Image (cartoon, rainbow, N blue to C red):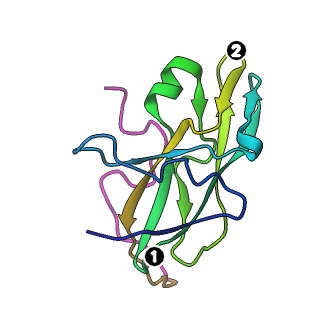
Amino acid sequence: MVTIRVIHDEGADRDVPLPSYETSGAAGADIRANLPDRGMLTLAPGARALVPTGLRIEIPAGYEVQIRPRSGLALKHGITLPNTPGTIDSDYRGPLGVILLNAGLEPVAVNHGDRIAQMVVAPVLQAQFELADELSGTARGAGGFGSTGTA
């Protein structure tokens, strides 16, 4: 098991729960809004906002944390993350914020303590990049978007 060390930002509400897995088989740990003055923000249709979590995390070398939308918020309210998945690198120690986007048709309230996204811890491999004179051939070749058919 990997350990992610967590500290609170100055002024954060320490009563907001830390990221947690809501079921034993969950791949993502839910993270919550930690809003100034324990308030609320409203996302108008098409609007986006950086929502604070009140946390900073320490990710071990060789891992990343991916920030992903919550499926229930996406289905019910059109709330998604415009940079999905967002990557947090192991050497970042700043505040953890989540960029929320309201892709729905109605304003959506985000309340202090609401579960707003999920974080997935994943191993990272770093590659070596090498300039070559040519690439090996494949059956697909240079076929791009939709080139493998519709079914």
Q: Position of residue 143 (x, y in %)?
A: 44, 47
- Predominant SS along the magenta part: loop
Q: Position of residue 78 (x, y in %)?
A: 59, 23
User: Which residue is identified by label 1?
Assistant: 134
- Indicate whether 125 appears above or below 24: below
Rate crowding at label 2 as few (under 14), some (14 to 19) or many (20 or more) other CA atoms within 10 Å. Answer: few
Q: Quadrant of the N terminus?
A: bottom left
Rate crowding at label 1 as few (under 14), some (14 to 19) or many (20 or more) other CA atoms within 10 Å. Answer: few
User: What stretch of residues is rendered in magenta?
Assistant: 132-151
> How far is disc 2 from disc 1 in space, using C-alphas?
51 Å
Q: Amino acid at mark 1?
A: Glu
Is residue 150 a member of the stretch shown in magenta? yes
Q: Residue at x 45, y 52 (%)?
A: 19
As helix, strand or loop, the secondary structure at mark 1 comes to: loop
User: Which residue is identified by label 2?
Assistant: 106
Left or right of residue 56: residue 126: left
Is residue 140 a member of the stretch shown in magenta? yes
Q: Amino acid at mark 2?
A: Glu
As helix, strand or loop, the secondary structure at mark 2 comes to: loop
Q: Residue furthest top?
A: 106
Q: Residue at x 48, y 56 (%)?
A: 66
Residues at circles 2 and 1 in contact by the CB criterion of under 8 Å: no
